[in-house]
Amino acid sequence: MLTVLTIAGFDPSSGAGVTADLMVFAAHGLFGTSCITSLTVQSTVGVRASSAVPTELVRDTLDCLQSDLPAAGIKIGMLATAANVGVVAGFLEGLRARGSRVPVVLDPVLRSSSGRDLLDAEGVRAMRDRLLPIVDWVTPNLEELGTLAGRIVMQKEDLPTAARDLQAMGRGLNVVATGGHLIPPDDLLVRAGGEMDWLPGEQIVSRSTHGTGCAFSSALLSRLVLGDSGLGAAMMAKRYVAEAIRTAEPMGKGIGPVNHLWPLREE
């Protein structure tokens, strides 16, 4: 069984963050390990508070896992602080220097769906300067794409230029701009070679949509580790999220979680 690593925040309601990522990995037949970067107080109603994990603990966790359970792929989610962005960037730079070419997918978590900032301006700058040049994939939603690219992104026509600008910040960077807030919810894939593909989406009416960004990025990583092409992995990840929304049962008083484990129930 292949091992994959998630570096992200902890959501006690298990809709998003490391607990959700681990379910996505399990649903794809992969063994997941995790490095928690932030503890949050949240439920389906929203995020009440968050506290970043000390950088020393993040660094030690990554080194400990790498020495015993080296990952075949890495997903990065919420990092909480510029210092943690730097620690994760340093860890990846060390892997690259040692010849490791495992796929790395960055889900740039900047703000919660309830509107709470989860990474400050200094952290965003560090993400641009340190992380984007060394990851392989980045999966921003419309707001995250606009923030990182320094553009206003509100409609489908805004995506191509902003995605190209974001891609220029990396070397061999693949961008999937997720259009979950568009009607229809089409995604845009800009591959490292310059090819551009629209991934058509289907509007699914549901209040169980918490964790879609985490689910997409983790499913994308899973499919890449399992050997899919870039386009194939993005298409399969989009299908995975659509079914996770479609098969989710309402939970909690707010925006409930998607059904991360639907492939296991289907089997």
Image (cartoon, helix red, strand yellow):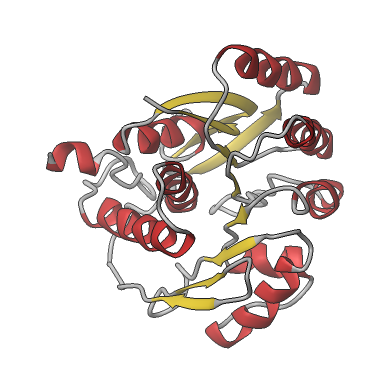
Quadrant for the C terminus in the image: top left
- Left or right of 170 in this view: 246: left
Picture residue at 65% right of the left edge, 32% below the top: 50
* Corner quadrant of residue 82: top right
* Corner quadrant of residue 75: top right
- Counting every numbered tag in the picture gives 0
Residue 94 vs residue 160, the one in the foreground? 94
- Left or right of 209 in this view: 76: right
235 shown above or below 30: below
Residue 160 location (% of width, % of height) = 62, 81
Picture residue at 60% right of the left edge, 42% below the top: 77
Picture residue at 37% right of the left edge, 76% below the top: 200
Residue 191 location (% of width, % of height) = 58, 68
Residue 133 location (% of width, % of height) = 78, 53
Point out the residue furthest to the bottom here.
157
Quadrant for the N terminus in the image: top left
Q: Is residue 13 visible?
A: no
94 shown above or below 243: above
- Left or right of 71 in this view: 101: right
Residue 117 location (% of width, % of height) = 69, 49
Point out the residue furthest to the left here.
267
- Left or right of 91 in this view: 28: left
16 shown above or below 169: above
Q: Can residue 223 be seen in this view?
A: yes
Point out the residue furthest to the front here.
99
Picture residue at 66% right of the left edge, 12% below the top: 64
